[in-house]
Image: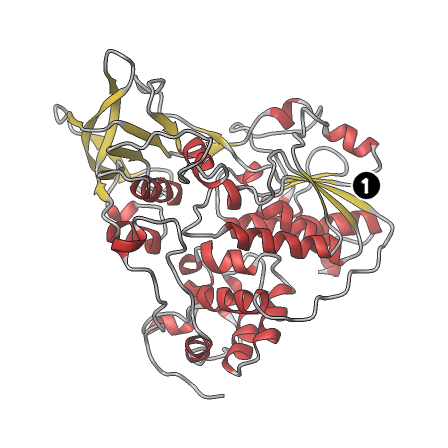
Amino acid sequence: MARNLSNTKVEMPVQDPQVRAGNFQEVALGYTAEMAMEEAQRCLNCRHKPCMDGCPVRIDIPAFIAHIAEGEFEKAFLTLNRDSALPAVCGRVCPQETQCEQKCVRALKGESVAIGRLERFAADWYRNSACKVPPKPIPNGHKVAIVGAGPGGLTAAGELARLGYAVTVFEALHLPGGVLTYGIPEFRLPKDIVLAEVDALKRLGVEMMMNTVIGKTLTIDELLEMGFEAVFIASGAGLPRFMGIPGETLKGVYSANEYLTRINLMKAYEKDASTPIMRGRNVAVVGGGNVAMDAARCAKRLGAEEVSIVYRRSMKELPARQEEVHHAQEEGIIFRMLTNPVQILGDDKNWVKGLECVRMTLGEPDASGRRRPIEEKGSNYVLDADVVIIAIGTSSNPLIRITTPGLETDQWGGIKVEGESGKTSREKVYAGGDVVTGSATVILAMGAGKDAAKAIDEMIMGKKTDASDT
């Protein structure tokens, strides 16, 4: 195999910033076959495979990249798909720069291999090619229920279906995908890709039950009474948090969850959409994570003249992916760092008319390891805003925990589990993803789903789980 000794990644084509800021089409356009092979040839195929240590689902990264380098694209996808049920999704939204790519040896003297871009290429190539559909697994006579059709639930469903389990996924919304569908905008993750990944699971025999709210339509105990031999709870963390400042009930204030759900799930950006949404002229987004970037970039695409990210720390502490920050800056989003809201101002009709903020300085590191923001006395000022979007995090909905006797939770409301197995305090009940950890990444939820599926299989089949078996 030829080697590419370049210290920089093959650049991925993207839409022009001035054009894409006015549409919801995908920003990154993907590699061509030639680009993918060129980038794959940068991989050194390290003997110890350090990149795999950074992957929560343990994809054999050097192997799939080696196939791409040789032009064996179907083999590349099949290698990926052994360990990941959602490669086209992960290739787009996973923070590879802090996981597999951070461990890449090439990063010691330049840029890492573009593992995420290559994963996306292989998955897209397979989806768009007339490849043979794998045969449906032979049923093993056992059935498992999954609560939530997000990345953790879909991963567990895929893992168990491949082992022959009859898997039913119960989803509260009318479309599967969870945060992939309602949270991540079309310009980052086209919804037809999510549905294609779901269709692949359906071909394995996974059944999807939409519009079913576990804890209301059915309880966990009722699922067990229906003959399911295990239940995996992957209902995510969709309950928005607010700051508790005056003015949060004014008209024109959104949680990022509501704002993005209206846009992504209900298509509020379309001209004939039945779902209303405020198209503000001056929009302020409070928060610094990926969700804040998504909300800000959506507001820009809805026609806002000025969109501001309001964050109480500096750019160095910004938790959003570097790529998303870069794209937001290119699109004209203003970053107001070291700024903290203290009040949302309203007019005499209770509509937002401004955001009162205070300037901050950074002190000593807090429990998170980031420097603690400290208010500058007397530095208050008013930022012009007619829409304010709060994007400071989420927590899990309490519905499942209050309707499931004996299900232990932590002080934040997350379900307690035993190690990586996902086993809860209730027999035959497992949990993983954001409902356990709080809001985290897609790939971490997928890793939890994969681990739980293994533990469920061991429990049902009576396999040993001690160290001698690992």
Relative height, residue 455 to residue 393 (above, below): below
Front residue of 460 and 125: 125
- Left or right: 109 as drawn, with respect to 104: left
What residue sits right under mark 1 in the picture? 229
Residue 454 placement (x, y as % from top left): 71, 53
- Left or right: 274 as drawn, with respect to 328: right
Residue 438 placement (x, y as % from top left): 51, 37
- Quarter of the rendering containing residue 466: bottom right
Q: Which residue in the rendered view is the most extreme toward the top?
A: 348
- Left or right: 21 as drawn, with respect to 123: left
- The 10 Å Cα crowd at callout 1, few under 14, some 14 to 19, many 20 or more, is some
Residue name at image x 79 percent, y 60 percent: 137
Front residue of 343 and 467: 343
Residue name at image x 73 percent, y 30 percent: 220
Residue name at image x 30 percent, y 18 percent: 247
User: What element does badge 1 sit on?
Assistant: loop
Residue 179 placement (x, y as % from top left): 52, 42
Q: Which residue in the rendered view is the most extreme toward the bottom?
A: 2
* Amino acid found under the numbered disc labelled 1: Glu
Q: Which residue in the rendered view is the most extreme toward the left?
A: 378
Viewport quadrant of the C terminus: bottom right
